[in-house]
Amino acid sequence: MRLALKAYLNQTVLPEEIVIADDGSSEETERVIKEFENNGDVKIIHCWHEDRGFRVSEIRNKAVALSSGQYIIFSDDDTIPSRYLVEDHIRYAERGYFIQGHRVLLGPKASEYFKHSEITYPRLFRLYINGEVQNISNSFRFWIPIIMKTKRIKGVRSCNMSMFRDDFIAVNGFNEEFQGWGKEDTELVVRLYKYGLKRKDIKFRANVFHLYHDKYNRDALRRNIELLERTLKSDKYYCKEGIDKYL
């Protein structure tokens, strides 16, 4: 959390606000947030609910409901955004599309100390040689990005995704029937496609650096896959259990 917040406060374009969707963490998270609340540059909003299992869909909906911006960038607290992340998402925002960014996977040793100041090509190449960076090409910032406009499902990750707020609300946000880890972001995208949006996939821009951690508990994954398959078969884009109850 602390590392992600520091990186967001060191962007080439600062976000208008940061809304933290806190899925029932401890008081330590609240203490960290208070360290940054008086930064003087960016408004920080802490959206918390009690810990009753993995309810990321619900807390994200609550956080978006508290937001005031017209364009939303989603990321996770286990990712460190590049200093251009906000600038890139805003620059390539386009009506009729959501943006899917990419991530660079860090190894366990690098993740112990990695922070936004480590995002330099010499440091990344050194980590790559030592086997502590995967898919390093995602960290490159070439002169011209590669932009693909598709309706693919593969590679959907809400740890680096953005869209217009009214598009998110139009499909009723994340589906809160999803409990436990997995597929809630894919299901959202399926409904965005049914609503009429396409995916703008940007390579060599809008990247984040994913810190290594143990895998999430996947006990609920089978049920979540069944929920996803139900949405795939449906012609509806509006979920019943979504953000509308908080607006």
Image (cartoon, grey):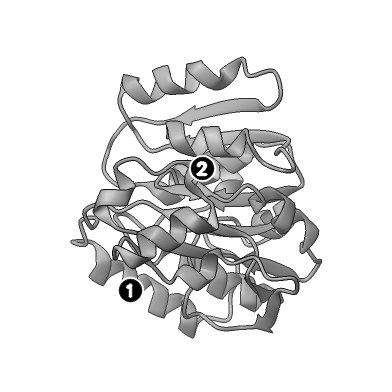
Above or below: residue 144 compared with residue 176: below
Give the residue at x 42% y 35%.
Answer: 1
Above or below: residue 247 compared with residue 99: above
| Residue 113 visible somewhere in the drawing | yes
Give the residue type that dot 2 points to: His
Residue in the foreground of this view, choosing between 180 and 15: 15
From the viewer's perspective, tell me whether residue 243 is left or right of residue 184: right
Can you give x and y, in whole percent of width and height, for residue 54 in the image?
30, 47
Answer few, some or many: residues within 10 Å of disc 2's Cα (few below 14, many 20 plus, some between 14 and 19).
many
Disc 1 versus disc 2: nearer the observer: 2
Q: Element under label 2?
A: helix
Identify the image quadrant of the C terminus.
top right
| Residue 159 visible somewhere in the drawing | no
Give the residue at x 32% y 48%.
Answer: 111
Can you give x and y, in whole percent of width and height, for residue 113 in the image?
34, 40
From the viewer's perspective, tell me whether residue 124 is left or right of residue 120: left
From the viewer's perspective, tell me whether residue 45 is left or right of residue 15: left
Residue in the foreground of this view, choosing between 59 and 72: 72
Q: How many marks?
A: 2
Can you give x and y, in whole percent of width and height, for residue 173 in the image?
57, 55
**Which residue in the protein does label 1 denote?**
225
Give the residue type that dot 1 points to: Ile
Label placed on residue 116: 2
